[in-house]
Image (spheres, helix red, strand yellow):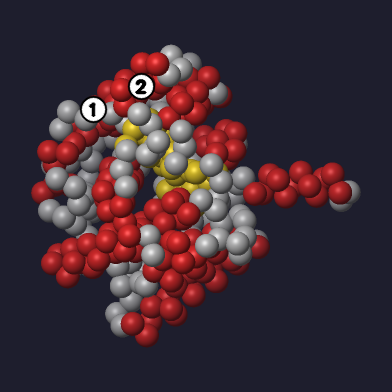
Amino acid sequence: MNLDEAAFNNQFNSHRLQQLDKNIFFGSLPSLNDLDTLRNNNIRFFIGVDIPTQTMSQLYTQSNLINLYSPQGMQDIVMINFDTSIIPHAIDMMDPTVPVYINNNTMMLNQLVSHLDPEMFATKQTIYGERRNYNNIKTNVFQLNNYDMFEQFNDWVEIFKSTTNGTLIFGDHENSETLIALLMSCVIKKSSNLKLYDAFQFIKSLKNDSNDNIQEQNIYWNSGLLMYYEAIRKYTMSWGINKKPIATTSFFNNKNISPNKRRGTNLPPPQMPMTPTSPTKDILVAAGAIDRCKRARSD
């Protein structure tokens, strides 16, 4: 292998999608160019983290994602993003693709929520937000900080996951502190007795870029993550650790869109750390999961 080939392979691998959990993937903005992997994993939901809304709108209306599954284009995918920089009253003065992006996806979100099993909102076991927050959704762009961002993010992950289609969570780069913190919140929601350190190590083991320049203290002391971590533990104590599976109607099937069959993929599903029974087992369980992920990646 010559230097050019090595450089190409390194660049390709640095943008490769990684699997966080069943039907949940994460990556960087350039990973959206890997259309084959998106199709192979039937990824139809996209969550942009700290991606400007104008960039998201261009992805939605002008990129190859339009015809990812069929000529129907925008009917096949749903996109949301978390953007604290957007100015709501200035949307009409932005790129004309922005209103199209917001209006189409907001309509799709409302249709999706109408198909959900009401039990998802009946208790705090799956969705932590109030049902009224999802009545007549006004936008797919969320200007949220702190705890509210983590709650809303995880609620949408649960909602998207309930459809059995794939979800891609992406930032402008893999080392985005906000992206990593949100991914950690997914881990601790599933395994509430894990420590934040264990969740961080788990995410780090999955990343393509093992960059050690990440400012870990900024993540550990993220006020929203800390508040969400405490909320997770509170709800776990109230409801127990065994969550009842919620059956939902297939959203895309009801729209007469046939999901691609899940073909072979080079993304082996990692085993997320399961909830340990004692603090001593926390690190052992997480370490075992990390080791399995590393072996899978080396294969």
Q: Position of residue 55 (x, y in %)?
A: 49, 29
Q: Is residue 270 visible?
A: yes
Residue 96 falls in which quadrant of the image? top left
Split into 4 quadrants, where in the image is the C terminus?
bottom right
Q: Position of residue 133 (x, y in %)?
A: 17, 39
Q: Is residue 69 visible?
A: no
Which comes sooner in the sequence, label 2 or label 1?
Answer: 2
Q: Which numbered dot is residue 200?
A: none
Is disc 1 surrounded by few (<14), some (14 to 19) or many (20+) residues within 10 Å?
few
From this view, report whether residue 298 is shown above or below residue 23: below
From this view, report whether residue 185 is shown above or below residue 122: below
Q: Which numbered dot is residue 138?
A: 1
Q: Position of residue 181 (x, y in %)?
A: 42, 57
Camera-side residue: 2 or 52? 52
In what element is the residue under mark 2?
A: helix
Q: Residue at coordinates 39% horizontally, 53% vertically from top-left?
A: 182
Is disc 2 surrounded by few (<14), some (14 to 19) or many (20+) residues within 10 Å?
few
Q: Which numbered dot is residue 90?
A: 2
In what element is the residue under mark 1?
A: loop
The three-letter code of the residue at mark 2 reads: Ala
Residue 93 falls in which quadrant of the image? top left
Q: Residue at coordinates 41% horizontally, 66% vertically from top-left?
A: 220
Q: Residue furthest bottom?
A: 280
Mark 2 vs mark 1, CA separation in Å: 16 Å
Camera-side residue: 298 or 92? 92
In this rendering, position of residue 259 left or right of residue 224: right
Q: Residue at coordinates 27% horizontally, 53% vertically from top-left?
A: 147
Q: Position of residue 99 (x, y in %)?
A: 36, 18
Q: Residue at coordinates 19% horizontally, 47% vertically from top-left?
A: 129
Residue 29 falls in which quadrant of the image? top right
Camera-side residue: 17 or 216? 216
